[in-house]
Image: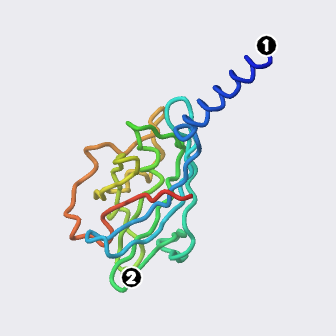
Amino acid sequence: MKIRYYQTLLILLLTLTCSTGNTTAAQQYEIQLQSSDGDQTIPVALLQLTPNEAGWDYQLKMNEVGFGDYFLSMRPFKCTTDKVNMLCHLAYPYQINRKISKADLVDLEYDLLFIRRKPTDYGINPWNGLYYKLRWRDGLIEGKAHEVDLDLLAVPPEDNQIRPIQSHDLHEIDGKQLWLPKLVSQPQN
């Protein structure tokens, strides 16, 4: 009798674990930048989310395909380009926690900083920074580009200030004026 009781209890626990497992399982997304009309999409990274007590820890692996190596203003950059536009990824140079939640995607925003330039420009100017303000929508991450002067990052942030870019530093821009104004995520199996 006791064995049957424990078997039933075990089956019940396994059923509950399987039915709730999707909310606690690791998730993977491809992060893409898109043109305003959605006709052009460039995969920029693979995002791995691992659940924690407050949301997710994440790892971001930047895409090597479609990005070239450029040495601009005495620094190496990974850039993607078309005939008239170039976006260069600016790896955030300081400490971040790499944790996100439903209400806070700022660490991921810092990992997805870009500088825009023309392929014919000399050097690179952090004044032309792009900051993708992210949000959750229907279980996916999406973002809209904002202009930002990334010269803010030239000096290490003061103690206890791991997020030096503030909302007043971000400036909305008409997406039709940018090459890739949207960021979208696609679930990966």
The residue lying toward the viewer, choosing from 16 and 158, is 16
| Residue identifier under label 1 | 2
**How many residues crowd around disc 1 within 10 Å: few (fewer than 14), some, or many (20 or more)?**
few
User: Splitting the image into 4 quarters, where does residue 87 fall?
Assistant: bottom left
Residue at 49% from the left image edge and 35% from the top image edge: 55
Above or below, 85 against 77 in this view is below
Above or below, 148 against 136 in this view is below
Residue type for callout 1: Lys
The residue lying toward the viewer, choosing from 59 and 27, is 27
Q: Cα distance, mark 1 to mark 2?
A: 70 Å
Question: Is the C-beta separation of discs 1 and 2 under 8 Å?
Answer: no
Q: Classify mark 1: helix, strand or loop.
A: helix
Instruction: Residue 52 in the image: state x and y as whole percent.
Output: 56, 34
Residue at 56% from the left image edge and 37% from the top image edge: 24
Q: Classify mark 2: helix, strand or loop.
A: loop
Residue at 51% from the left image edge and 62% from the top image edge: 45
Q: Which quarter of the rendered picture does the N terminus lie within?
A: top right
Residue at 23% from the left image edge and 54% from the top image edge: 171
Which disc, if any, is residue 131? none
Q: Which quarter of the rendered picture does the C terminus lie within?
A: bottom right
User: Splitting the image into 4 quarters, where does residue 82 fall?
Assistant: bottom left
| Residue identifier under label 2 | 82
Instruction: Residue 33 in the image: state x and y as whole percent.
Output: 39, 66
Q: Nearer the viewer, mark 1 or mark 2?
A: 1
Residue type for callout 2: Asp
Q: How many marks?
A: 2
Q: Image check: 79 left or right of 181?
A: right
Instruction: Residue 145 in the image: state x and y as whole percent.
Output: 30, 59
The residue lying toward the viewer, choosing from 14 and 33, is 14
